[in-house]
């Protein structure tokens, strides 16, 4: 049984049912039933046309469920008004499923869960594992999301930016259990790139590939964080980097710069450097300026301050940092780093300890505590 | 088998014997400490006595209901004297004695100078309704 094939077929089968007039939640149930049937039947009796088989079985399941439903007539009328199923329209079906799953009426976490389920074809159990919540909790979250979008029709235009944000959220969730959400996000973004011609979609794919290529080197064997400058660059996935850079270059050539392309450009400059010392910090600062122009987020300004510290020296970095509010996460860690580079070891040690106290996760806290410990040991000697 | 909660404290527990703040250790001492706790949990997984463990961030907020439409009351940023829980581990063991033994072992994690920190851990049994306990089934 080819699970990857089933997963890749799920969204288009679902879209066919919704197009034929099935309500989203009912269509989803019917497709899940058909998938269960496929797992049972296919090993002994593989179909010639897998998608056609799934559509037929899912539609039958949907009709069965509808017939036993009290609202049968209403639904049948609804189906009656629908255009007859005909040749596939020019737009990719899956694209509209993306728009539906990233609908603005959904909370970001619901949009992510629904995307993984409907577009990614992941099981509720896999999604629950990835988010470390009980399966029943995730099932409720998904069915609530399905109810929220159940009245939304497919002919409404969707916002690509929202879809991209949802995919980036999936990417940043990392992984646990048997689904690697970063790899899943890359797979889905590839599909989106194939379906829609938009430089920012390509920019997001490039960004994900460039980050993902360096992932193996980001943690040591004991689980501790390894900062960029100390990463073993021979462990970077050069094929993924080359692909990311290629995709980014053709996106940039279209001269419609967006946030994701600018972020990917920064990631590409890091990935391109043979050693940390050879990083082109001057160009990175220029890209952060572009990014600040596009978003003006304090996180961007913080990262820019660190880059300025590398390009023009730690004093310049600290000056750039001065304009950023104290409460911003990781600001203290950045200040500690810049103070150490400026030679002020005892201030840096204190700031690292303070940053460790405020760290958002355990790996980061341990890393920052170690930095404080390293400097304190130096001060004692 | 009975479940016990091992509570680690940021503050609120008696001071450990080897009382040096972590940022004053050497990086190697920190690694040894983290490794000890990881090995401890791995061993309990193998003996079938591990249930769950999580670390908690130091910053927390007190909240209570304060009437319809009114904001919850918090203790603000002045939490210095508050008992602060740093994390927990849940174990499922045969006896109270075994739970004590494991808590002692976890408390012996190495700290500054590579010597055990002798950290105080709080050991709390879980309430569990026994299906054979008649008092839990009035009328049953």
Image (cartoon, grey):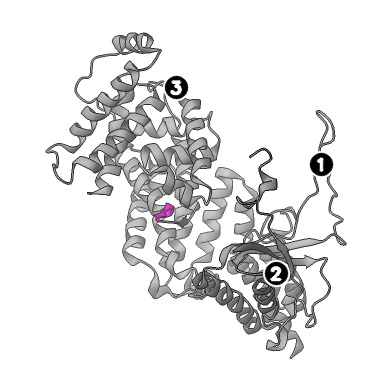
Circle 3 marks a residue in which chain?
A
- Report the quarter where the C terminus of chain A lies: bottom right
x, y percentage for residue A176? Answer: 46, 57
Give the labeled residue for mark 2.
A336
Residue B135 at x, y = what percent?
A: 70, 47
**Disc number lying in front (2 or 1):** 1
**What residue is shown at x 42% (from left), y 25% (from top)?**
A157
- Do marks 2 and 1 share a chain? no
Above or below A232: residue A238: above
* Horizontal side of residue A249 vs A378, given as left or right: left
Residue at 36% of width from left, 56% of height from top? A244
The residue tagged with tag 3: helix, strand or loop?
Answer: loop
Mark 3 — residue? A152
> Closer to the N terminus: mark 3 or mark 2?
3
Query: Badge 1: how crowded within 10 Å, few (<14), some, or many (20+)?
Result: few
Check residue A179 for magenta coloring.
Answer: yes
Q: Quick check: do tags 3 and 2 share a chain? A: yes
Callout 3 environment at 10 Å: few (<14), some (14 to 19), or many (20+)? Answer: few
Say the numbered circle drawn on residue A258.
Answer: none
Q: Label 1 vs label 3: CA separation?
A: 39 Å
Q: Residues within 10 Å of mark 2 (few under 14, many from 20)?
A: many
Mark in front: 1 vs 3 = 1
Report the Cα–Cα distance between label 2 and label 1.
Answer: 37 Å
The reply to whether the magenta stretch includes residue A322 is: no
* Subunit bearing disc 2: A
Can residue B77 be seen by looking at this rendering? yes
Could you tell whether A10 is left or right of A371 in the image? left
Q: Is residue B24 left or right of residue A311?
A: right
Does residue A255 show up? no
Q: Percent from the top left, x then y, of residue A91?
A: 29, 29
């Amino acid at each position: 049984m080819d699970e990857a094939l089933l997963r890749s077929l799920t969204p288009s089968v679902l879209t066919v049912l919704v197009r034929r007039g099935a309500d989203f939640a009912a269509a989803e149930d019917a497709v899940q039933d058909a998938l269960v049937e496929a797992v049972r039947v296919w090993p002994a009796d593989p179909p010639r046309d897998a998608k056609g088989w799934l559509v037929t079985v899912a539609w039958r399941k949907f009709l069965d469920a509808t017939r036993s439903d009290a609202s049968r007539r209403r639904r049948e009328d609804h189906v009656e008004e629908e255009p007859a199923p005909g040749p596939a329209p020019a737009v990719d079906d899956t694209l509209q499923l993306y728009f539906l799953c990233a609908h603005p009426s959904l909370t970001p976490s619901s949009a992510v869960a629904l995307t993984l389920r409907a577009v990614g074809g992941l099981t509720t159990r896999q999604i629950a594992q990835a988010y470390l919540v009980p399966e029943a909790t995730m099932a409720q979250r998904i069915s609530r999301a399905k109810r929220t979008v159940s009245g939304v029709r497919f002919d409404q235009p969707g916002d690509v930016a929202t879809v991209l944000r949802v995919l980036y959220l999936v990417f940043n969730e990392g992984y646990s259990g048997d689904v690697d959400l970063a790899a899943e996000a890359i797979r889905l973004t590839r599909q989106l790139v194939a379906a829609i011609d938009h430089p920012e979609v390509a920019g997001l794919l490039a960004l994900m590939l460039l980050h993902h290529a360096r992932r193996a080197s980001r943690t040591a064997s004991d689980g501790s964080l390894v900062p960029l400058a100390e990463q073993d660059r021979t462990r970077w996935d050069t094929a993924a980097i080359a692909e990311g850079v290629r995709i980014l270059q053709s996106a940039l050539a279209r001269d419609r710069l967006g946030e994701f392309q600018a972020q990917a450009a920064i990631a590409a400059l890091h990935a391109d450097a043979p050693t940390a010392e050879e990083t082109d910090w001057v160009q990175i600062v220029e890209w952060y300026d572009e990014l600040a122009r596009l978003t003006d987020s304090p996180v961007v300004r913080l990262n820019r301050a660190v880059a300025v510290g590398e390009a023009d020296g730690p004093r310049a970095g600290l000056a750039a940092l001065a304009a950023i509010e104290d409460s911003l996460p990781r600001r203290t860690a950045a200040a500690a780093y810049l103070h150490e580079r400026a030679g002020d070891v005892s201030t840096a040690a204190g700031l690292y300890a303070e940053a460790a106290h405020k760290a958002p996760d355990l790996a980061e806290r341990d890393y920052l505590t170690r930095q404080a410990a390293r400097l304190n040991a130096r001060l004692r000697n | 088998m009975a479940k016990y909660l091992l509570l680690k404290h940021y503050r609120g527990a008696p001071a450990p014997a080897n009382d040096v703040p972590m940022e004053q250790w050497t990086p190697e001492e920190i690694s040894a400490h983290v490794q000890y706790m990881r090995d401890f949990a791995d061993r309990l997984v193998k003996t079938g006595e591990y249930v769950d463990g999580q670390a908690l961030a130091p910053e927390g907020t007190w909240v209570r209901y304060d009437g319809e439409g009114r904001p919850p009351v918090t203790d603000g940023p002045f939490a210095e004297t508050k008992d602060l829980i740093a994390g927990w581990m849940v174990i499922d063991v045969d006896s109270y004695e075994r739970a004590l033994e494991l808590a002692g072992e976890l408390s012996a994690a190495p700290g500054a100078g590579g010597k055990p920190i002798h950290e105080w851990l709080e050991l709390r049994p879980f309430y569990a309704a026994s299906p054979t306990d008649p008092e839990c089934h009035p009328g049953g």
